[in-house]
Amino acid sequence: MSLNDHWMQRDLAVLWHPCTQMKDHEQLPLVPIKRGEGVWLEDFDGKRYLDAVSSWWVNVFGHANPRINQRIKDQVDQLEHVILAGFSHAPVVELSERLVKLTPAGLDRVFYADNGSSCIEVALKMSFHYWLNVGQPAKKRFVTLSNSYHGETVAAMSVGDVALFTDTYKALLLDTLKVPSPDCFHRPEGMGWEEHSRAMFAHMEQTLAEHHREVAAVIVEPLIQGAGGMRMYHPIYLKLLREACDRYGVHLIHDEIAVGFGRTGTMFACEQAGIRPDFLCLSKALTGGYLPLAACLTTDTVYQAFYDDYSTLRAFLHSHSYTGNPLACAAALATLDIFEQDDVIEANKQLSARMASATAHLADHPHVAEVRQTGMALAVEMVQDKASKTAYPWQERRGLKVFQHALSRGALLRPLGSVVYFLPPYVITPDEIDFLAEVASEGIDIATRDAVSVAVPRGARTEFRDPG
Ligand SMILES: Cc1ncc(COP(=O)(O)O)c(C=O)c1O
């Protein structure tokens, strides 16, 4: 028995994996990873895989990065963890100071959680609680975009709209207001991203005009709707949204958990719209992809609405055991050092141009509706009919074919349904980008060569797919 098989069997005897139909593993081998270095992961039999999805979008400077490793090693000998209520420590103070400096002016307070979904819970609760504290208890609903994703906890699911993840739990969810997404994949023929995103804003304007008295906040994934299939839109939408939120007295929550830290081409997506949200949620790449940590930044205005004598019961009594963990903060500090010292945002421009040129030929593929890109995220959408952009039936799991081919070639490409995407660590080389493009092209050829074979009943749900 190979070492991979050995670990796979021990794993499958006791684990229940995330976001997985476990029965799939009767056919689909699990890949046990022994070590990582840079963009490469290596299994127990010595086969290497290029991590094209940054291990669920968290890793920005490669696996086992020596600079991040060293900072964590230094920290672990000092202090591994301490309760953050009533106590503090140097890494969390230093990190908070740097995040306040790095993010748009006016985001002056940092509240920590320990994963993205919990960070969304913090922002939603804080916004609702703010309005309560300032005497506007009617403002308790949230406005969200269709096709959005904000995490897996119940309130985070409530503001999400990827049916695959939320439909089953509908009975548990909050009553939110849903507005059509500015997603440019569906723009009319001949219309540019800016014009489409601007036109789609009319729906948001109308919803806010009608409901602002009962709305606490609008929450968006700025520029890229990640789990919704790497769908993208123009920054003008965010600018218009900021203006409308100000006009209607509604908070704006930016969920930059997936797009923060350079993914869209700027350090934070909100910079491209020249705006400051009322809440900025960060996680994933915050620690370079090493340890779970999340930060919800907000304004002094919000902070002051909670600041009072204890007896007024206005305090934000929310906590997680690992809030502001020192090891995670140390990893985050090392990550910020690398951004600064290596001028990463500037250097990424060349990598992002290489991602575009290496995949440009796919736009002519008969089963590719679009190759789209924002900064260091690039997506290729496979469809059964190019002209009408008709999707493949999700039951055929075409993306899975790309995934399997990529594994055989030594790449971890994990499509979202029929959307093949690259979201690589920023330490990828131009040659490695070319390799990924080659593997993706072969995979797309294989996945699209057979005609549609699943008869989809009229009226059947079309939005389900493989989770990615
Ligand atoms: C935009 C966005 N928000 C929130 C989350 C949830 O983060 P976590 O998986 O750490 O709970 C994700 C995760 O993919 C995400 O992409």
Image: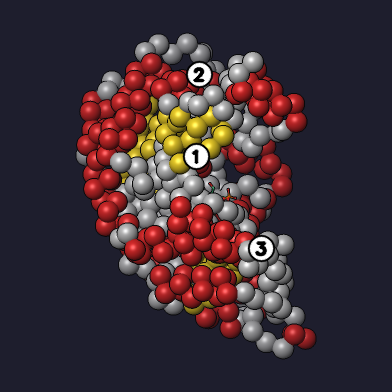
Q: Residues within 10 Å of mark 3 (few under 14, many from 20)?
A: few
Mark seen at residue 66:
none
**Circles 3, 1 touching at the beta carbon (< 8 Å):** no
Residue 362 placement, left or right of 466: left
Q: Which residue is mark 3?
A: 80
Q: Residue at x 32, y 67 (%)?
A: 274
Which quarter of the figure has residue 242?
Answer: bottom left
Q: Residue at x 62, y 61 (%)?
A: 76
Which residue is at 48% across, 35% downward?
41
Give whichever of discs 3 and 1 has the lower sequence position.
1
* Secondary element at image label 1: strand
Task: Give me the disc on residue 36.
Answer: 1
Side of 327 relative to 56 (left or right): right
Q: Secondary structure at mark 2?
A: helix
Asked if 242 appears above or below 93 in the picture, the reply is above
Label 2 and label 3: CA atoms lie apart by: 47 Å
Work out how far the residue at label 3 is from the one at label 1, CA to CA, in angstroms.
23 Å
Name the residue type under label 2: Glu
Give the position of the N terminus as an image quadrant: top right
Identify the residue at horizontal 37%, vertical 68% (top origin): 275
Q: Residues within 10 Å of mark 1 (few under 14, many from 20)?
A: some
In whole angstroms, how far apart are the C-alphas of marks 1 and 2? 32 Å
Please give the residue where the numbered disc 2 appears in the rendered image: 396
Q: Is residue 152 above or below residue 20?
A: below
Question: Do tag 2 and tag 3 residues touch (Cβ < 8 Å)?
Answer: no
